[in-house]
Each structure stands twice: as structure tokens, then as C-alpha cells.
Image (tube, rainbow, N blue to C red):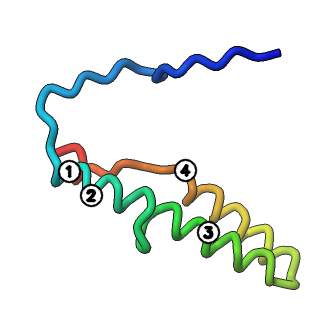
């Protein structure tokens, strides 16, 4: 049995909504050149590769790219 609580790990207080920053953040998550798209490309190449060492490297890269990072330009 589990209990689901919908709460953030850290409190977030938005003082001024900014649509332009929201567009940039959204494109980083799911846009064609975003982090998730890059991770999926590496992982899909991993499954079509026959060399086990190369497949391992592609897996490691895909996982590390998949960890979403907010760049310094998004903070400003």
C-alpha cells in the first residue's frame, strides 16, 4: 500500500509569472533540441548498436543527458 502526496521537494514561490522564461524552460524539457530529445536519441542508438562497449557508453551518455539541468541563462 502506498500514499501519494502531490507536493514539491522544495517550496516554490512565483512572485512574477514570465511567459517568455516559461517557453524556454518548456523547450528545454520537450522541444526537439531539448534534454529529453537528446537523451532519447542516445538511448535509441544504444539499442541498435551491436558493440557492447559502445552500447554501454551510449547508455551512460543517454542517462546523464536525461537528467534535466537548468542552465544559467534560464535563471536570469
Read off the residue under disc 1.
Answer: 21
Name the residue: 25% across, 22% down: 13
Read off the residue under disc 4.
Answer: 67
Read off the residue under disc 2.
Answer: 24
- Most extreme residue toward the left, as rendered? 16
User: Are the residues flagged by discs 1 and 2 in contact, CB closer than 8 Å?
Assistant: yes
Read off the residue under disc 3.
Answer: 40
Q: Quadrant of residue 29?
A: bottom left
Structural distance between the alpha carbons of marks 3 and 4: 12 Å
Q: Earlier in the sequence, mark 1 or mark 3?
A: 1
Q: Earlier in the sequence, mark 1 or mark 4?
A: 1
In this rendering, the answer to whether 65 lies above or below 72 is below
Quadrant containing the N terminus is top right
**From the viewer's perspective, is the residue at label 2 or at label 4 nearer?**
2
Structural distance between the alpha carbons of marks 1 and 2: 5 Å
Whole-percent x, y for residue 46 in the image: 75, 75
Whole-percent x, y for residue 62 in the image: 64, 64
Structural distance between the alpha carbons of marks 1 and 3: 24 Å
Q: Earlier in the sequence, mark 2 or mark 4?
A: 2
Whole-percent x, y for residue 8 in the image: 46, 23
Structural distance between the alpha carbons of marks 1 and 4: 20 Å
Name the residue: 70% across, 61% down: 60
Q: Secondary structure at mark 3?
A: helix
Looking at the image, residue 15 sits to the left or right of residue 54; the answer is left
User: Are the residues flagged by discs 2 and 4 in contact, CB closer than 8 Å?
Assistant: no
Q: Secondary structure at mark 2?
A: helix
Whole-percent x, y for residue 41 in the image: 61, 75
Q: Earlier in the sequence, mark 3 or mark 2?
A: 2
**From the viewer's perspective, is the residue at label 1 or at label 4 nearer?**
1
Amino acid at each position: 500500500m502506498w500514499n501519494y502526496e502531490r507536493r514539491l521537494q522544495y517550496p516554490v514561490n512565483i512572485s512574477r509569472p514570465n511567459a517568455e522564461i516559461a517557453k524556454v524552460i518548456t523547450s528545454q524539457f520537450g522541444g526537439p533540441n531539448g534534454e529529453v530529445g537528446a537523451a532519447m536519441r542516445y538511448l535509441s542508438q544504444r539499442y541498435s548498436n551491436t558493440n557492447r562497449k559502445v552500447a554501454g557508453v551510449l547508455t551512460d551518455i543517454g542517462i546523464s543527458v536525461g537528467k534535466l539541468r537548468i542552465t544559467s541563462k534560464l535563471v536570469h
